Image (cartoon, helix red, strand yellow):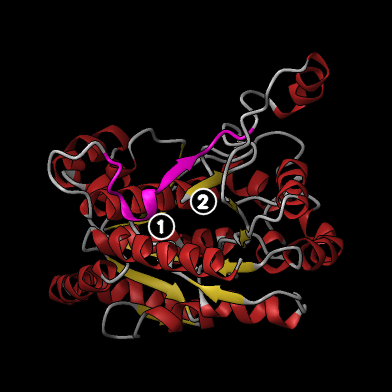
């Protein structure tokens, strides 16, 4: 089973959730495949001889025409195509796969709903993007989404292809040892007491204004660990809050070791307006943090209010939840422990098994 597992613009997308999810898929597949190899084997006994190829071009895609003109071979050799992005490079591979009779799996990390509110002009672009996404995802033999919520969105477009959902998962090993980074990180950013935090790119769609307004309404420390745009592509909300943050809000910018963020914070607050799943939520849960989330269908799909999280709909509910967690360390610990158990249900071994099953299904049907 030779799988072309492709992420277009992988380097520019390095700090995105799409890149995190793609890396998790690859690691999940390798772990599950390696777990089925006999000790001392050279790897040939992996299930179905699984091999992953991530560079179908053998270099930058724009160099392909010149290499073809010279007669150079292009290293596209696979049984199944699995794409994680939606641009022209992915589309070219999809066309190649269809012309050569190879099955196509498209992973839907982008919807018009979660694209809106991401950067300046993204809300206006969301409607035409939705038209393109409906057409693009319809090219697949199978579309994979991170949640049933996203599956239902695509079916409502409607996408003319079968759609299944598989969790993005969480790489528990990538968070190992995070506790040791707590004090150094808190000293670095001058943090004391109960720290309310978020992790990821700073977008208005992810609840930036709500996050900052909650800080203004409380005496707690708020920290957002993650990069933000400073140029013309930045939205008005991002420019406003990052240039003029409330005195108890810190924007750290890009942080090299994500474990530091999860170590320094106490309550993960994520008032996002739209998500396909939310990998950072699972990472916070895996670290045993109490999480406070906006009450969205996608979160109710995976989590239970009052058991492994607190779900809130209004600013008053968010403020009450944060103040309760600040005043009650036992509640924080109880929610965090149950959250850790929930995160284990999304470990990479689960993702790998389900992806392998999908691959076999597509190849058997071919």
**Stretch of the chain drawn in magenta:** 43-56
Q: Tell me if residue 51 is in the magenta stretch.
A: yes
What residue lies at 77% left-to-right and 37% top-to-bottom?
232
| Res. 27 visible in picture | yes
Compare residues 322 and 284 and report the one nearer the observer.
284
- Can you name the residue that lies furthest to the top here? 70
What residue lies at 20% left-to-right and 76% top-to-bottom?
338
Disc nearer the start of the sequence (2/1): 2
Residue 335 lies in quadrant = bottom left
Q: Which mark is residue 156?
A: none
Residue 339: give x, y in percent of width and height: 25, 72
Compare residues 354 and 183 and report the one nearer the observer.
354
Q: Tell me if residue 54 is in the magenta stretch.
A: yes
Q: Secondary structure at mark 2?
A: helix
Horizontal relation, residue 241 to residue 72: left or right = left
Residue 135: give x, y in percent of width and height: 82, 65
Horizontal relation, residue 234 to residue 11: left or right = right
| Res. 171 visible in picture | no
| Residue pointed to by mark 1 | 280
Q: Which mark is residue 17?
A: 2
Callout 2 crowding tier (Cα within 10 Å): few <14, some 14–19, many ≥20? some
Does residue 254 lie above or below 87 as drawn?
above
């Amino acid at each position: 089973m030779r799988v072309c597992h492709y992420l277009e613009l992988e380097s520019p997308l390095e700090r995105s959730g799409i890149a995190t999810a793609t890396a998790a898929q690859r690691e999940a597949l390798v772990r599950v495949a390696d777990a089925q190899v006999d000790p001392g084997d050279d790897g040939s006994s992996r299930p179905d001889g699984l091999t992953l190829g991530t560079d179908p071009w053998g270099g930058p895609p724009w160099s392909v025409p010149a290499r073809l003109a010279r007669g150079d071979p292009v290293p596209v050799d696979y049984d199944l195509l699995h794409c994680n992005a939606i641009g022209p490079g992915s589309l070219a591979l999809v066309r190649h796969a269809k012309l050569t009779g190879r099955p196509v799996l498209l992973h839907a990390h982008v919807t018009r709903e979660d694209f809106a509110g991401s950067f300046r002009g993204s809300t206006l672009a969301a409607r035409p993007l939705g038209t393109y996404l409906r057409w693009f995802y319809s090219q697949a033999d199978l579309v994979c989404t991170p949640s049933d919520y996203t599956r239902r969105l695509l079916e409502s477009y409607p996408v003319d292809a079968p759609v299944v959902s598989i969790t993005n998962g969480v790489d528990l090993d990538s968070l190992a040892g995070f506790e040791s980074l707590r004090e150094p990180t808190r000293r670095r950013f001058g943090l004391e007491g109960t720290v309310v935090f978020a992790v990821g790119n700073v977008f208005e769609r992810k609840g930036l204004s709500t996050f900052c307004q909650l800080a203004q309404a409380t005496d707690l420390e708020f920290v957002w660990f993650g990069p933000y745009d400073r140029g013309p592509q930045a939205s008005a909300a991002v420019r406003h809050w990052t240039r003029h943050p409330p005195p108890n809000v810190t924007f750290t910018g890009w942080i090299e070791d994500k474990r530091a963020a999860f170590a320094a914070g106490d309550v993960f607050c994520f008032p996002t307006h739209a998500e396909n799943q939310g990998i950072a939520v699972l990472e916070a849960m895996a670290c045993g943090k109490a999480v406070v989330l906006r009450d969205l269908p996608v979160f109710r799909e995976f989590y239970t209010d009052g058991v492994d999280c607190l779900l809130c709909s209004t600013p008053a509910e968010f403020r009450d939840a944060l103040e309760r967690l600040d005043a009650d360390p036992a509640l924080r610990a109880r929610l965090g422990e149950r959250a850790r158990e929930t995160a284990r249900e999304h470990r990479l071994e689960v993702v790998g098994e389900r992806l392998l099953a999908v691959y076999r299904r597509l190849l058997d049907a071919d």
